[in-house]
Image (cartoon, rainbow, N blue to C red):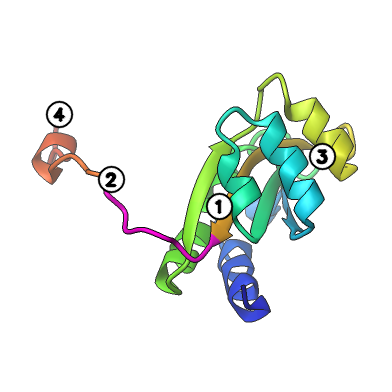
Amino acid sequence: MEDEKITKCLEAAQWAPSASNRQPWHFIVVRDERTRKKLSDMHPYGRFMRESPVVIVVLGDPKKHPKYYLYDPSIATQNLLLAAHAQGLGTCWMGVINTPFEEDMKRLLNVPERMRIVCCISMGYPDETSTSDRRELAEIVSYEKL
């Protein structure tokens, strides 16, 4: 996958809204095949990390914002996912925070104890088209009151 596309995704994440503009996020770009395999072996839904050429690991730093260190990186992740889609890339978001394997992933990636792994994102060119369905807007949107 082209470096320019990864950079555009990371730039989109960089510009995400952030409480008090503290930006309590960090991103680890993993290309190494052995590391991706180890990550995929740790995560029960991680097969895409083995198959895709890039995994982006999203971290939250409580030192930078003790209240929003999980929310802000999640917003940045959404920006990253949208930027990937706009460039024709496929992604798979996999939650990590508060799982039994978060600490193992932190050790593998040399993540400091204070930081948290919010999620992993596998990224590449999709082999198939999405078949995901979404509920109708009328089911999920109300105006003025619920």
Say which residue label 3 marks: 63
Q: Residue at x 22, y 43 (%)?
A: 134
Q: How far apart are marks 4 and 1 (CA)?
A: 29 Å
Q: Is residue 127 magenta?
A: yes
Q: Taking the image as drawn, is residue 8 in sight?
A: yes
Label disc, if present, on residue 77 of the rendered structure: 1
| Dot 1 alpha-carbon crowd within 10 angstroms: few under 14, some 14 to 19, many 20 or more | many
For this view, does 72 lie left or right of residue 34? left
Residue at the extreme top of the image, as rendered: 100
Label disc, if present, on residue 143 of the rendered structure: none
- Which one is in front in this view, the residue at disc 1 or the one at disc 2? 2
User: Secondary structure under badge 4?
Assistant: loop
Q: Distance between the residues labelled 1 and 3?
A: 19 Å
Q: Which of 16 and 54 is in front in this view?
A: 54
Q: Which residue is drawn at 36% across and 58% down?
A: 128
Over which residues does the magenta segment extend? 124-131
Q: Distance between the residues labelled 3 and 4?
A: 37 Å
The mark that comes first in sequence, 1 or 2, is 1
x and y percentages locating residue 4 in the rendered image: 63, 80
